[in-house]
Image (tube, coloured by chain):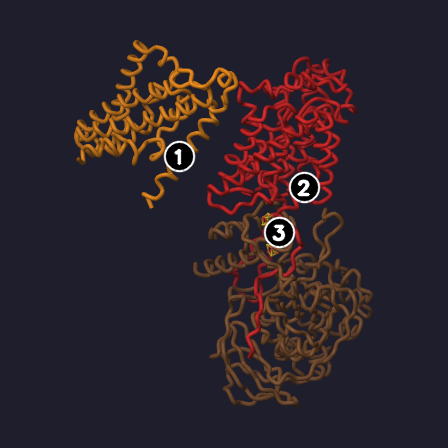
Chain colours: A orange, B brown, C red
Amino acid sequence: MSIFKEFTKGLWQELPPFRLVLGLCPVLAVTKSATNGLGMGLAVIFVLTWSNILVSALRKVIPRKVRIASYIVIIATFVVIVEMATQAFFYPVYEALGIFIPLIVVNCVILGRAEAFASKNGVVASALDGLGIGAGFTMSLVVLGGLRELIGAGTLFDVEIMSAAYRSHSFSFMLEAPGAFICLGVLLAIMNAVSAPSSS
Amino acid sequence: MGLRSLFGALPPRIPYWAEAVPVESLPLPPKATLLWREASPGDVGVAVGDSVQTGQNLAREGAGLFMSTVTGTVEEINSLRGADAVEYAVVGIKTLEVDSYDSSIKSIEDLASASPEQILAMIVRAGFPGFDAVVKGATVETLIVSALDQEPLTAVNPQILAEHAGDVSVGIAMLTRVTGAKKVVVAIPHNSAHTAHGISADQAEIVKVRAIYPNGLPEILAKKQGGGLLLKTDRNGTVGNTLVVSIEHLVGMVSCLREGRPFVNKVVTCCDKPGGELKNILVRIGTPVSMALENLDVKLPPGGKLVINGPMHGYACFSDEQPMTATSDSILVQNPAEVHRFENTACINCGKCSAVCPEKLEVNLLGRFSEYDIFDKCAELGVENCIECGLCVYVCPAQRPLLHLLAHAKLVVKEETAGK
Amino acid sequence: MKAADLTVSTGSHWHSGAKITDFSYNTLLALVPAIAMGMYRYGVSAAGVIGTAMASAMIAEAAMQKLLGKPVRIADGSAAVSGLLLALLLPANTPAYMVIVASVIGITIGKLCFGGLGANPLSPALVGWAVLRITKPWAGYLDFDLALINYDLGFSMQYPLAVLKASGALGIQDFNTWNLFLGNQTGGIGASAIVCVLGGGLYMVARGLVRWEIPLCFLLGVVIASSLFRLVDSAANADPLFHIVTGNVMIGALFLSTDNSSAPINRWGMVAFGLCCGMMTVVLRAWSVYPDGVVFACLLMSLFVPLLDKLRASTIVVRPTNVQITGETVEGGTSS
Ligand code: SF4
Ligand code: SF4
């Protein structure tokens, strides 16, 4: 039960971009479409889970003083794997995400989980934590990307949802950077409003 | 009330009263109430039932000076916390019709040859306020004798210049000697018909001051005419090097010292309706407001406001038993319709308050910081410099209680600095 | 002792009678000539844009205040002013949905999310306009040459600033400065009525509701920057007068940059703010992709307002509070 909780907490209580307000750089930058969000999210799940497992397994071995550097090396390893894999098998996604895949290395969600969770907990719990947080992250990215894509371009996962008339005059402000901030802020406000009674 | 300039382009101009108002004497009050600032009942040296003389020092041995202004029997000794958050000792005295004067106030026949120390001691003993710092030895660079009233709807000072020109000259010479001031200024309203005859140019510099609020406030006079800020003492010490004396007090000093009498009668201006006539009354210090109002046949409207010392920076009383003190200049009665109500609206950042503030404070920020209890920011922005003139409140379109907020912040900042 | 039933409060016991609505209602009044000119020129469609903008701004404000649990205060007129200013910047035939999107986003995100009147760091009207401007598919509606193609008002229907951008100082020789000043140019519904805007602005200044520093320095900034540009390359850049009488400069100087809460309140802050806005306008006109730069210049400088407000002519003399009396040394402040 408690192990399972490590997974589910990432889906709501510790939902990274909204609850922890972490990893905002990719959240804002790559969510121009739901597809991009999903791709980014999957990459993060992979890196987060594996780096959590490895950090947790090595937590007794890594000296405290050089732990951040060691975590970065571990994370970077998986990021390179992801980068090469996307480049090889999902080239359009690789094109769209561009610099943000290598930048996963410095994504604070991953380093944050390594530092705050994996370095203190067992391998299984860390793996579940990584999966859960990663899933939550992916979910947020897809929701944000989907919303922005739907309003900004009239499509969802590149499927044309809105009428052609809307698509040719879409509210592309949502695809711009200010649109991303506003969209994130509004979602954050709604989430806080929804969960306010339970937290108080 | 209060004029707004043409089209409002200029800051609001609140003119002082220009015409002379005749003074009418009031009989002695049946009971006088005396207030002693920053003192407790324990500092009072008389007991209930004791009889006291006019001019007698009621303070306990070594506690300073607290002068009785009437002759009679002590009825009540009490304490009170004033609107300025300061403790007052209160003594109520049932008065006798005829004054018998305390013998320790002696007349000084020749003011020109008496020693400065002797004169100073007698000025203080006769009950003139504001000389504490001088007594303690502070240097006075500039002496300002103000023929301006502090507030609109007050008509105490300007006529005195005309009526007692000779005494003014004697008084200036005396005070110059007592304080050792290097610069002496006589401030008179620009629209005053009476120039200061009899005051020679080498005796004092005569400055015409625009008769609009807040130019008559001592703080502003000291800032504009003197080399520094107001000379006043608080527990921490002396601030500034300018002494401001109202011309009423100056003339009072001369006659009191000549006759060996204490300073017990004060001219007070009353106003009971907007645009109405002003009435000047001469009252015994300690007379309750209610008696002054009865005498003028003014009824206090329920829900109205009773303001002492002027509409801008005066204070609203919560009871008509409030006694007159040596610095009470005016009584203003407002009916409920005239009472200005504050609003709980947010500042719209129009900047009018900062533009009008004579101390050039950023009142818009200060008001907000004080509202949200961020007092260290208030201290940083210099809230202590606020002279509580009330102009910011007067102009604020959001009708915010700015002075309330600022005075509160001032108090907190002062307490915090004192605690450190 | 009878208990008198008295009201007590701190001073002052008088009030000048100024109200929050002074500013907004007078702004509405001051803009009446510009509105009238716009309606005369562009007819019902202009009225439609103005009405839509004002109504949607006010409804958005009321709804948002309800949502946030604040007292509904649309009667203070500030939302109406924001809506009106937004409408005056737009071409007469802007589709209603664009107007609504802009005013709703301007009011909700630009103003009420920050705490409402007085707390908004950016002017709501400008936020709304900027949202439209950076939405690429809608750019055609904001390009005056395209948007107003069906109008013929008896003067050159080319947007002067677009001509300047396309063909430099040579292209604008056909424009008569006096004609431009009289409002014979295409542009926003009200913003192009230069003389009416100027008149309304002067009224606001005379009433003391807009302080003169910002408008004057705004125009001065435009003159300085455009003179500098002309000094460098007189073939590509217009003269200062042309800059002042075209586009949004006049409405920007008098109405947009003077929004209470997004402008400084201290004199030197206002001077710096005005100058920077003016110069930034010309820089954006010369170097940005958009023909006019007033709105972005104002938005950008509004972000610097807390900093600019620190520019003060007089420093505060903090009274020394712990000076001991020694008989000789008495600390005195200096008068400023
Ligand atoms: S009351 Fe204080 S803050 Fe207000 S205007 Fe007067 S000095 Fe300035
Ligand atoms: S006058 Fe009132 S509303 Fe205007 S800035 Fe000052 S406090 Fe704010």
Provide the residue designation for mark 2: C210
Disc 2 to disc 1: CB gap under 8 Å: no
Q: Which residue is mark 3?
A: B396
Q: Residues within 10 Å of mark 1 (few under 14, many from 20)?
A: some
The structure residue drawn at horizontal position 70% and vertical position 59%, both measured from the top left corner, is B213
Give, as a three-letter code, the residue at label 1. Answer: Leu
Residue B305, relative to residue C123: is it above or below? below
Q: Rounded to the nearest whole Å, what is the CA distance between mark 2 and mark 1?
A: 37 Å
Q: Secondary structure at mark 1?
A: helix
Up-down relation of residue A3 to residue B223 (above or below): above
Quarter of image, res B167? bottom right
Asked if marks 2 and 1 fall on the same chain, the answer is: no
Give ligand 1's quarter of the image. bottom right
**Could you tell me if residue B402 is visible in this image?**
no
Chain of the residue where label 1 is placed in the rendered structure: A
Q: Nearer the viewer, mark 3 or mark 1?
A: 1
Q: Which residue is mark 1?
A: A188
Q: Position of residue C270 (x, y in %)?
A: 63, 39
